[in-house]
Amino acid sequence: MQVSLHKPEIKLESLKEDIKDFLKTSGWEKKLQNAVYSELNVFPSPCHPAAPPEHMKEPLAYMRKAQGSWEKRILKSLNSMCTELSIPLAQKRPASEQKELLNKWNEMGTDEPDLSLFRPVYAPKDFLEVLMNLRNPNYENGEQPSFRNHLGLIQVPLKVKDIPELKEDFSELGLNTGQLGIDDSAQVPPEFFENEHVRVGQKVLAEQDSAAAQQYVRQGCPTALRADLWALILNISNQPEDILYYEQLKSNVIQYDLLVDSLIYKDVKLTASNDDYYFVFEDYLYQVLLCFSRDTSVLDHFTYSSATPPKSYIRGKLGIEEYAVFYPPNVAPLCFLYHEPSKLYQIFREMYVRFFFRLHSISSHPSGIVSLCLLFETLLQTHLPQLFYHLREIGAQPLRISFKWMVRAFSGYLATDQLLLLWDRILGYNSLEVLAVLAAAVFAFRAVNLMEVTSLAAAEAVLADLSTLKVMPLLQIFLFATVT
């Protein structure tokens, strides 16, 4: 705008209107709108002016206290590992090691370091135990059963949506609306829905409008347009300065060795390396996650997260947020969409600070893992009471099975095309609630078999393989064909 003042077509007497016209014709108006829309999607609504700063992070004191205790437990586990193995949290790599790492940067999957002594910091079941023990001290928790008791594992009084409210929120998933994942099957002629949907998607991309893109993906993304549409929604353009920033992070990885590096290696080796879909992306995963562990811009999300980063500094200059990356939601599905490491990195970072961090921190947010667990249990208890009660009686509480699906956003459980259709809806609705709905829909789909099991192991066996499931029919039937 400042530069435009020197242009001859900008007149002093009509300065405001002339600058507005300049922003429109130059394309900057759209970029500003997208940037503002992105901020509105990420940051919470302003609190009351008199509210203390911690209320922006998490309004409920008992949730803040539980999150603080969980962080201390993780740090204690880390510190004891450092002591046992005589390994510092961070140290500078010798010059020879730096050179070796730089040479094999694109082949890190071939490296086989001895990780036998490193143990995962925590498993999903450890986190679930913490959530199960959450209690609101202001709420009467009588031992005697009453009509107010929730029969599930989560015992905190948070407001979650019922089916009518979910129907209203997810109205675009209705039976009368075209959906990729249903209406693009081989049995449906493409001229009925798919061709027109692709044409509209191309128009949305041409307009470069983030809000329109977000609305569009609620009906699913065509495979050929998904990478560009997601980048538009997340307001990522991969400019030269972004590529340079990624290279700086890479340089930090080369120079410094962190304890978290070994944990990342172990996590990838135990998960993606053994996965039929993702093993080919092993090198990408190391690159993205190692850079992520050095990215201090990720710290900004702690202004609206219940979590607080433990800070560690190498040689007094590099701030590292350790624990957030020990249990990263799987970055692997994004590797199918983005082939330049810098853009892949930016998309993952933005998905993390918008959505995935909520899956491993304790908060009362509607998309937080506590609310998702409660929503899942409430949906099952309300709409499949016989199944819920049966599984509870045999010691197979449904949440013990579904928790790992939700905490990983179903990554590693669904077939990749189905997972990307699910994540389309997460981006489209700016919410993780669809994870809880899908988890309940899976139980509904397998209800007949589950009614016959007599143990937790048998129930887990019935639900062991989700790779053949079709996400959109399950969601549609559960939300719009359930009797309320």
Image (cartoon, helix red, strand yellow):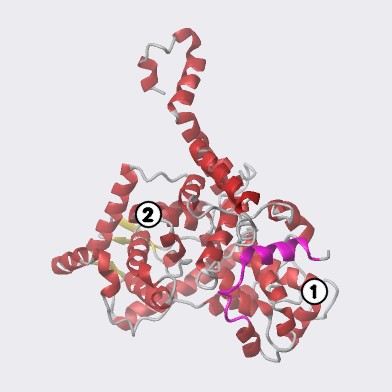
Q: Residue at x 50, y 72 (%)?
A: 412
x and y, in percent, of residue 86 in the image: 28, 80
The residue under label 1 is 149
Question: What residue is pinned by disc 2?
Answer: 296
Q: Earlier in the sequence, mark 2 or mark 1?
A: 1
Q: Is residue 40 left or right of residue 10?
A: right
* Residue sitting nearer the eye, 34 or 132: 34
Q: Is residue 17 left or right of residue 447?
A: left
Of 333 and 181, which appears nearest the observer? 181
Q: Residue visible at 40% across and 81% down?
A: 119
In terms of secondary structure, where does tag 2 sit? helix
Q: Which of 12/171 is in front?
A: 171
Query: Taking 455 as reference, is 42 above or below it?
Result: above
Give the quarter of the image for residue 167. Answer: bottom right
User: At 52% from the left edge and 46% from the top edge, which residue is drawn?
Assistant: 233
What's the amino acid at mark 2? Thr
In the rendered image, the vertical position of residue 59 relative to residue 263, given as above or below: above
Decide: few, some or many residues near mark 1? Use Cα within 10 Å; few <14, some 14-19, many ≥20. Answer: few
Q: Secondary structure at mark 1?
A: loop
Label of residue 392 in the image: none
Q: Which residues are magenta?
A: 463-482
Q: Based on the displayed image, in which of its 4 quarters is residue 364 positioned?
A: bottom right
For this orientation, the residue located farthest to the left is: 96
Type of amino acid under label 1 = Asn
Q: Within the magenta stretch, is there residue 473?
A: yes
Q: Position of residue 292 (x, y in %)?
A: 37, 60
Quarter of the image that includes the C terminus: bottom right
Q: CA distance from mark 2 to mark 1?
A: 43 Å
Is any part of residue 133 visible from this angle?
A: no
